[in-house]
Amino acid sequence: MSRAFVKEDVDLPERSGRKRSASGLPPGATNYITARGAQRIRDALAQARAANDSARVAELEQTLASVHVVDPPDAPSNSVAFGATVTLDIHGTVETRTVVGVDELDFERDAVSWISPLGKNLLAADAGDRVTLEDGRVGKITSIEYRSA
């Protein structure tokens, strides 16, 4: 490589020393979770304690200490919010997606993280809107509901 293209006077940026959370969220990001997801983590913590699984107990305690529970909206809405289960019509096929926190993805069969591209698209949508799914298909939002704990 020619020395003309090497900048020796430029220092590499320093790392802040902040690490990603156990959830994989960037430093400083709020770790949102539904009330249903928080309860499932508390249940898993009780099971880990009963099984004397100290590593799992520590992991779950750290997760619970980092979460911010988001309650569903008080009134029904035509807009998708965190925790919503969205029904989509994809050319006559019905599918659902539930917008949840990163620590509860394993608890919902149809879960999608609020920080994923699809999750962000859903959170910006209203009933009747069309959204592009993970695989490129387009679905129309036909209903929005909130499941209780």
Image (tube, helix red, strand yellow):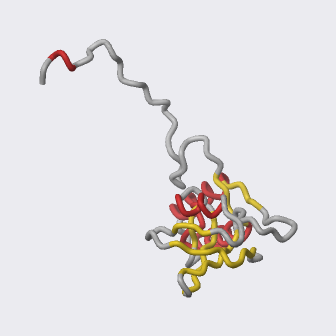
Image coords of residue 76 (percent x, y): 83, 71
Image coords of residue 136 (percent x, y): 45, 69
Query: Where is the N terminus found, in terms of image quarters?
Result: top left
Query: Where is the C terminus found, in terms of image quarters?
Result: bottom right
Measuring 53% from the left and 45% from the top, which residue is drawn there? 26
Q: Residue furthest right?
A: 75
Measuring 72% from the left and 63% from the top, which residue is drawn there? 81
Measuring 64% from the left and 53% from the top, which residue is drawn there? 31
Left or right: residue 149 compared with residue 61 = right
Looking at the image, is 124 positioned above or below residue 131?
above
Measuring 67% from the left and 63% from the top, which residue is drawn there? 125
Disc tally is 0
Q: Is residue 50 visible?
A: no
- Front-most of 84 and 65? 84
Q: Residue furthest left?
A: 1
Left or right: residue 71 compared with residue 105 = right
Give the image quarter of residue 70.
bottom right
Looking at the image, is 57 positioned above or below residue 6?
below
- Front-most of 13 and 56? 13
Image coords of residue 35 (percent x, y): 74, 67
Q: Residue furthest bottom?
A: 92
Give the image quarter of residue 96.
bottom right
Q: Is residue 80 visible?
A: yes
Give the image quarter of residue 52.
bottom right
- Front-most of 41 and 106? 106
- Front-most of 14 and 121? 121
